[in-house]
Amino acid sequence: MRKQIVAGNWKMNKNIQESIQLANEVVANVQGLTLNNTRVIVTPTFVNLTEVVRATDGSAVEVAAQNMHQAKSGAFTGEISAEMLTSLGLKTVILGHSERREYFGETDAILAEKVNAALANNLEVIFCFGEVLEDRKSDNHFNVVESQIKNGLFHLEASAWENIVLAYEPVWAIGTGETASPEQAQEMHAFIRKIVADKYTTEVAENVSILYGGSVKPSNSKEIFSKEDVDGGLIGGAALNAEDFIALVKSF
């Protein structure tokens, strides 16, 4: 049975004191919940990872990284390797976020290399993809999503998909206040599950968690998460407030 996941992407927000405080608040609120099949993940900046790992130790709250470099080591100033992440006790990394693609020039080919490096180091990958508004308006959104998934992930063996989580993020709905309707989210998630099934098997497709990432907030999360193929969310702004973030967890 695939997991339901609420993952908070803190992006470039929160200094060390603020990160510890937010982590402590999330942990305190999660302690009183019966999570059942739901995973709760937070992803602070690199410089705050150690302290947030310490703050969440022994709790049900998992800590993931926002990105990593594909090389094992070397002259890559400012970058972080998979081994560095695992040495902190991390088990999950986000790859392919639209902001990495847009602002830092990460191509499908680069992301395929990053996926390989992450899996080689026993890291679970939350793999992001999604269309911009022009693609949606021109009815090209299905082609864009299929291309990004195929180029980034379809070189993998079926067994590798045990460590893959998919995160569909319509770029036009990130930080804009715009949100895909629950029906639009379900339509795309069902499409994603079908192309995975067509490439691999129905079993692989049914076992992979597919998250929605696009301005999810307490007022719309329950309806979005209730859709058959939506298994949770990759949360931006709402993850920076413990009360809002826990409200999303409670949506399940």
Image (tube, rainbow, N blue to C red):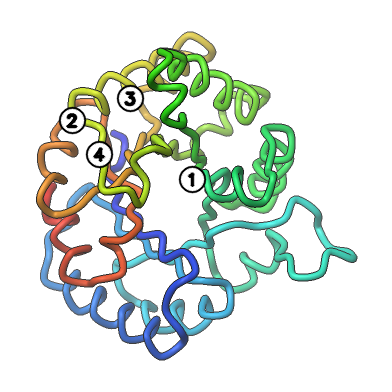
* Separation of residues labelled 3 and 4 (CA atoms): 15 Å
Up/down of 228 relative to 118, above or below: above
What's under tag 4, amino acid-wise? Answer: Thr
Q: Nearer the viewer, mark 4 or mark 2?
A: 4
* Separation of residues labelled 3 and 2 (CA atoms): 10 Å
Q: Nearer the viewer, mark 3 or mark 2?
A: 2
Residue with the mark numbered 1: 126
Write the residue at 69% across / 69% down.
Answer: 84
- Determine contact: label 1, label 3, CB under 8 Å: no
- Determine contact: label 4, label 2, CB under 8 Å: no
- Mark sitting earlier along the chain (1/3): 1
Residue 197, position in %: x, y?
Answer: 44, 14
Q: Check residue 189 in the rendering and tell me which mark sits there, or answer none.
A: 3
- Mark sitting earlier along the chain (2/1): 1
**The residue tagged with tag 1: helix, strand or loop?**
strand
Residue 93, position in %: x, y?
Answer: 54, 54
Q: Nearer the viewer, residue 213 or 118?
A: 213
What's under tag 1, amino acid-wise? Answer: Ile
Q: Check residue 179 in the rendering and tell me which mark sits there, or answer none.
A: 4
**The residue tagged with tag 4: helix, strand or loop?**
loop
Q: Residues within 10 Å of mark 3 (few under 14, many from 20)?
A: many
Is 187 left or right of 131, judged from the image as shown? left
Residue with the mark numbered 2: 182
- Mark sitting earlier along the chain (3/4): 4
Up/down of 95 relative to 135, above or below: below
